[in-house]
Amino acid sequence: LGPNDNAEERLMNLAGAQVLLTVGSNADRSDARDIQIAALGSEQQLRYRDWIRRNREYVDQKSGGRIGYFHLPDMGGQGMLEFIKGFYPQHKKDALLIDVRYNGGGFVSQMMIERLARKTWAFMRPRRGLQDSYPARVHDGPKVVLINQHSGSDGDIFPESFKIRGLGPLIGMRTWGGVVGIRGDKRFVDGGTSTQPEFAWWEPKRGWALENRGVEPDIELDFLPEDYVAGRDPQIERGLAELEKSLKENPPKKPAAPPTPDKTRVPAAKP
């Protein structure tokens, strides 16, 4: 490649094809080698995976392993999959930082809220092995949700429900406010489709006010262009600070099991 060449341009229209590349770190080709790759149609998923991996590792490192992190890209199949991959491996962390920025909406937020709102009321212990909560896989510690103006629909309903249930603070910017769902089952003879606003959402305190307004954060904090350039995420930083404060003020309670009851039978005394 010359100084005016573009690697992406050379790979145009080669998605799925086997491509032979000659790569090296020296312009004189002294360390050149050939590699064969299958070109991708998009690198979006790779960049997304790298972004959430870096966020998760950063949160883990900054908190000494006490705080978990996961991102929910939508409230559909992909979002539910990310919730499963994020919540269950980290539900024993002392606190959770839940990121719903850029959430594309969907229909499964109530399932996630139900899981996040569960509390432990008892414990189960096997004869040998680790004790578990009852119900199983519950997170009892503090939680924070990150929101921004690029989340809408069920991405509005999730943080609004999180706030209504009193599960923790919302940090970021007011959400998009496009809540009314559509019905898209009216097909035209020319192959087109008509969609109609169909499914509205309301709750007793605000009524219908979520539509066209969105969810107000408890702590308003923008993500500015200079933050992107500097490689920092002020919303994650504030979320970490709030969770660390909660953990300090209310340390996690991990009750110890009472003494194991003695169930041995004592032989009856002989007359």
Image: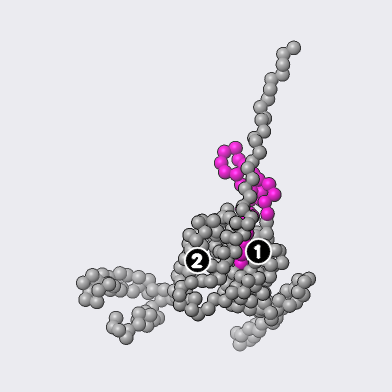
Occupied quadrant, residue 256 = top right
User: Can you say whether 36 is above or below 137 in the image?
Assistant: below
Was residue 7 drawn as part of the magenta stretch in this picture? no
Label 2 element class: helix
**Residue at figure coordinates x 22%, y 74% from the top left:** 29
Which x, y percent locates residue 19? 33, 74
**Residue at figure coordinates x 64%, y 41% from the top left:** 257
Pointers 1 and 2 in contact (CB under 8 A)?
no
Occupied quadrant, residue 209 = bottom right
Find residue 181 and name its label: none
Which residue matches tag 2? 55
> How many angstroms separate mark 1 from mark 2 (CA)?
20 Å
Callout 1: few (<14), some (14-19), or many (20+) C-alpha neighbours within 10 Å? some
Occupied quadrant, residue 110 = bottom right
**Residue at figure coordinates x 74%, y 12% from the top left:** 271
Q: Residue furthest top?
A: 271
Mark 1 or mark 2, earlier in chain:
2
Which x, y percent locates residue 133? 64, 48
Was residue 139 drawn as part of the magenta stretch in this picture? yes
Which residue matches tag 1? 168
- Main secondary structure of the magenta stretch: loop
Give the residues in magenta.
Answer: 119-145
Q: Amino acid at mark 2?
A: Asn
